[in-house]
Image: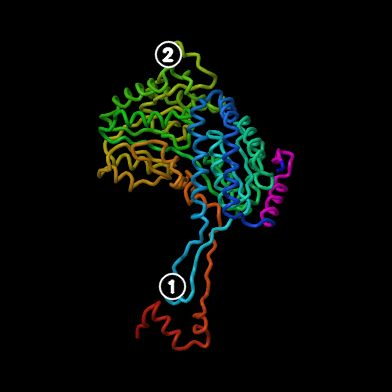
């Protein structure tokens, strides 16, 4: 097997793409056994590089627990590969479709064929899973792939380059290493499909670049995902799920709850319970070994600035778990923070936070919650803690989000059979499930004519059978 091409800024990306496309056309679409073998090679490589990946991710973030990387990234990749491999036969099977009454002599079906070469642009927050799960999906659909990981996690990107080199030739999978300029060039390549995970502003630029070559895109973006706690539902189960969802990866998660909407009667119970739960999860405060650092100085400074602005403007700011002995925290670590009563025009309530800061807003009735959620861009996720009563149903029916979580946070992403994706400003298209396979496939409609053909009767000069056919489909002509 050839070693993977180390596609760096000086290398011709277009040339790599062309070699992959020529190889794809020469070899033809891979069969079921070939696709399963490719997925098996990917899984084996991930397991072989497990320690290197855990070390690299922790080094890139400043600190991240091996357990968090294992549970939130590596386990997800392995589970996704297993899911795709088990269901590939069914996914690849032609799908029979209905034919109209006048065409019953024929039959129709849809074949899902590989597109060719798929580009994958991945972010820094979950650099392993958000690179390798889209890659696994592309391989399951029978494609070749070029991958551009984030420059903000360079050690992890290098390990993934080595990992993929051990499993694939450069005509199957190639990795592009580089910064924003290389990312811009990458997004402008004439792929057969481009998959991007990242921020909404960058997603807009990626879509513009792809449009120049009419490249279809899947955009997995973000936004301000609301967390709604029904009146009377501030309990241990709710609080443990909220703290988990908000503080996993120190809040650097695209589907993390971005702000909480709590009934005004439950505010103080929520605040007290949140602080108590944080202390139970992270006994040493921000220096706990399971608490993740912020990925960069720039991002850390941005988060501090958001909190400082809210504090200056009269918000109540509570840092959870900060003790005298933990005041000097690890570099770039930000304490779990609650912000209560921030002004409506505060940046914290309008920018995606992407950190361990949770603004809390109060409400009086569910109509107020619905109006507030609908006033902003459609979020990637919406979380509701409460009963499926009238208010709960109103919230779910009257709001639109990429996905919904009821009495949990984050866990919907781990359901391989559910589509995952945003809507509006939070994204376009979905992956996971059969939806991901189909997003990276071409649905080719095929109609097979039987021995008897309607075209033998419905042609010029038209006659009585044409009148009969029209009466069946359109009804009798009115006098």
Query: How many angstroms separate mark 1 from mark 2 (CA)?
Result: 72 Å
Q: Is residue 44 above or below residue 17?
A: above
Q: Earlier in the sequence, mark 1 or mark 2?
A: 1
> What quarter of the picture does the C terminus occupy?
bottom left
Residue position marked by numbered label 2 in the rendering: 323
In this rendered view, identify the residue nearer to me: 210 or 97: 97
> What residue is shown at x 41% (from left), y 34% (from top)?
257
Q: Hey, which quadrant is residue 401 in on the image? A: top left
> What residue is shown at x 63% (from left), y 31% (from top)?
154
Q: How is the image coloured?
A: rainbow
- 105 is within the stretch colored magenta: no
Q: Is residue 19 above or below residue 355?
A: below
Density class for disc 1 (Cα within 10 Å; few <14, some 14-19, many ≥20) is few
On the image, the x and y values in percent for residue 270 come to 31, 27
In this rendered view, identify the residue nearer to me: 149 or 303: 149
Q: Which mark is residue 100?
A: 1
On the image, the x and y values in percent for residue 272 come to 32, 22
Q: Taking the image as drawn, is residue 188 in sight?
A: yes
On the image, the x and y values in percent for residue 140 come to 56, 49
In this rendered view, identify the residue nearer to me: 435 or 192: 435
> What residue is shown at x 70% (from left), y 43% (from top)?
1
In the image, the segment drawn in magenta is 3-25
Marks 1/2 in contact by CB < 8 Å: the verdict is no
Specify whether 80 is left or right of 157. left
């Amino acid at each position: 097997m050839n070693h993977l091409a180390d596609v760096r800024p000086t290398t011709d990306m277009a040339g790599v793409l062309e070699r992959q496309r020529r190889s794809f056309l020469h070899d033809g679409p891979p069969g079921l056994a070939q696709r399963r073998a490719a997925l098996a090679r990917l899984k084996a490589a991930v397991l072989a590089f497990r320690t290197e990946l855990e070390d690299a991710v922790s080094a890139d973030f400043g600190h991240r627990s091996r357990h968090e990387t294992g549970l939130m990234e590596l386990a997800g990749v392995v589970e996704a590969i297993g899911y795709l491999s088990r269901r590939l036969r069914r996914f690849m099977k032609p799908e029979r479709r209905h034919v109209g009454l006048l065409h019953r002599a024929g039959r129709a079906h849809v074949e899902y064929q590989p597109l060719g070469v798929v580009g994958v642009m991945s972010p820094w927050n979950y650099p392993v899973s958000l690179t390798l799960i889209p890659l696994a999906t592309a391989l399951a659909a029978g494609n070749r792939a070029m991958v551009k990981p984030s420059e903000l996690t360079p050690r992890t990107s290098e390990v993934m380059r080595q990992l993929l080199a051990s499993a694939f030739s450069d005509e199957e999978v190639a990795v592009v290493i580089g910064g924003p300029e290389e990312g811009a060039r990458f997004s402008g390549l004439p792929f057969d499909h481009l998959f991007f995970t990242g921020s909404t502003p960058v997603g807009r630029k990626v879509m513009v670049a792809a449009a120049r070559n009419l490249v279809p895109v899947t955009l997995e973006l973000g936004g301000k995902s609301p967390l709604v706690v029904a009146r009377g539902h501030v309990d241990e189960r709710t609080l443990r799920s909220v703290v988990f969802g908000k503080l996993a990866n120190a809040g650097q998660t695209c589907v993390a709850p971005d702000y909480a909407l709590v009934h005004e009667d439950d505010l103080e119970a929520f605040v007290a319970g949140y602080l108590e739960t944080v202390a139970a999860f992270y006994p040493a405060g921000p220096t706990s070994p399971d608490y993740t650092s912020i990925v960069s100085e720039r991002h850390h400074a941005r988060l501090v600035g958001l909190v400082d602005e809210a504090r200056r403007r009269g918000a109540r700011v509570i840092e959870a778990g900060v003790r005298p002995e933990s005041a000097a925290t690890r570099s770039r670590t930000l304490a779990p923070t609650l912000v209560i009563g921030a002004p409506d025009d505060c940046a914290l309530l309008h920018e995606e936070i992407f950190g361990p800061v949770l603004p809390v807003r109060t409400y009086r009735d569910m109509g107020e919650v619905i109006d507030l959620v609908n006033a902003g861009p459609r979020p990637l996720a919406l979380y509701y803690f409460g009963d499926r009563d009238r208010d709960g149903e109103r919230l779910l029916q009257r709001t639109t989000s990429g996905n919904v979580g009821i009495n949990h946070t984050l866990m919907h992403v781990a359901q391989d059979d559910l589509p995952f994706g945003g809507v509006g400003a939070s994204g376009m298209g979905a992956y996971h499930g059969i939806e991901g396979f189909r997003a990276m496939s071409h649905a080719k409609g095929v109609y097979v004519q039987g021995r008897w053909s309607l075209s033998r009767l419905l042609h010029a000069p038209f006659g009585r059978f044409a009148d009969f056919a029209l009466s069946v489909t359109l009804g009798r002509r009115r006098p």
